[in-house]
Each structure stands twice: as C-alpha cells, then as structure tokens.
Image (cartoon, rainbow, N blue to C red):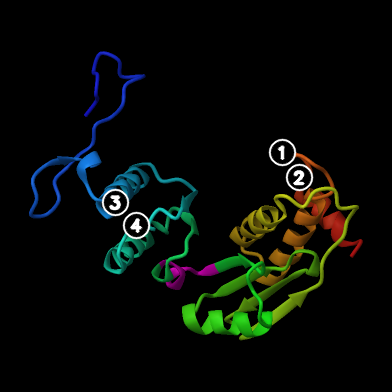
Amino acid sequence: QLEDEKDILNCGIDIKVTLPGKTVKTISLLSGGEKAFVAIALYFAILKVRPTPFCILDEIEAALDDVNVDKYINYMRTLCNKTQFIVITHRRGTMEAADILFLSDESVWEDYHAFLWELSRTYNPRIIVLGRGSKGAAMFVRDHDRIYDLEAVHVGEVVNTVGAGDALFSAFVHFYAQGMEPLECLKRAQIFASAKIRVSGASRGFVTEAEIEEMSQWN
C-alpha cells in the first residue's frame, strides 16, 4: 500500500506479506531469504502482466536456499516463451538451468579446454562462451560436442579495453536471438567488441550490423 495516498508520485510503497504459517509482516521485518523471495515474486508478477522482450537479473536469487533456487528457476522457465532472461549468478542451480553460459577466463588458471569440458559435464548447457581478452575467445557447442577456438580480431588500435567483455556478450546475444549459428554469432561479436575498444567512452564506438559485415572482410 502507499505510504502517503495524498502524495502518490513521491511516497514509498509499504509491502505487506503473509507467508505460509505466519502472520502478516511488512517486508522490512522478513529475513534476507524471505525478502529476496518476495521481491522475486513481485518482479515475476509484473513480468507476467507486462512481459518484456528481455530481462536482466543480477544475483537476485543469491540469498535463497537451494530448494527455493529451484522454485525460482522453474517459475522463470514458465516466462521464457515471452521473455529472454540474462542472469548474472554464482548459484549452481541457476547455472544448471541456463541454456548458455558466458564467462571470462580471468580466473581460469588451468588449461581452458579442460575447464570448458568440465563445465559442459557439470552444467550441461547448450553453449559455453569463454572470452579470452587479447587471446581471442573459445566456445563449446553441445550439439557438435566440440570446442571452437577463435583468434583475437583487430579492427583498429586499442584505446580502452573497459567494456570489451560486455560488448562481446551483448553482440553475441543479439545475433543469437536472430537465429544465427553460434560460431557465426561469436565471430561477429568479436568484431563488435574489437570496434568498441578503438575509442574511449562507454557510449562510443558501437558499430552497425552493416559495418560488422564490412569489417569481417578485413579478417
């Protein structure tokens, strides 16, 4: 309910929750896990009423126990026919449910091929993309039962590498959503990321699909 019904544009919202077997409480009196579960339920309710093409969730389930992580994942899957979820997580249950795992090699000290094979056996995703910075990228594709290695792409002098991983990820998702083959998605994503790091500034350096196709002829 509104904290001040006379000032609906500026006042806060008081959320009251009745959990199974408990009396009504305001959300501030709940435990960390309970607060997270209520917030997730509210967020999913909004998505159910007003679906969006994609949704980014940043460790939203971090405070949940394993049982409730499974409930969270199962309900998320019921929304996947209308919304594509991009999830930042460290929870095993969430990673096991993912169709695509995307990560960098910053903490990969062992042979990255062995690392990708182990990930594929542990979580069984369709695709794993591993950004390797100046060394390129690698990708496991379950349908091919194979790891692909891609050398780094250079379309200009490197000015600032901040945001390179985000650029690689966003471009890959963009092309994959169009139905393009994973390997072609990653090749184009590398060009997009390489173009981004030619300039400084978070909002500069982005190229169009036509420019990506043109740059692909250079490599």
Mark 2: which amino acid? Phe
- Inter-mark Cα distance, 3 to 2: 40 Å
Nearest to the eye among marks 1 and 4: give it: 4
Q: Examine the structure image and report whether residue 215 is included in the region drawn in magenta.
A: no
Name the residue: 47% across, 56% down. Answer: 85
Residue named by callout 4: 63
> In the figure, 181 relative to 113: above or below?
above
Q: Are marks 1 and 3 in contact (CB under 8 Å)?
A: no
Would you say the residues marked 3 and 4 are in contact, meaning their CB atoms lie under 8 Å apart?
yes
Compute the Cα span from label 1 to label 3.
Answer: 36 Å
**Nearest-to-viewer mark from 3 and 2:** 3
**Residue at the disc numbered 1:** 203
- In terms of secondary structure, where does tag 2 sit? loop
Label number found at residue 179: none
Instruction: Please tell me the numbered disc located at residue 206.
Output: 2
Q: Gap in Å between the C-alphas at discs 1 and 2?
A: 8 Å
> Range of the magenta residues?
94-100
Of the two numbered discs 1 and 4 on the same chain, state the one appearing first in sequence: 4
Q: What is the CA distance from the residue labelled 4 to the residue labelled 2? A: 36 Å
Q: How many residues crowd mark 2 within 10 Å: few (<14), some (14–19), many (20+)?
A: some
Nearer to us of marks 4 and 2 is 4
Residue 144 visible, this orientation: no
Q: CA gap, disc 1 to disc 4?
A: 33 Å
Q: In this rendering, does residue 90 appear at all?
A: yes
Identify the residue at horizontal 51%, vertical 84% (top origin): 121
> Where residue 51 appears, x then y in whole percent?
41, 46
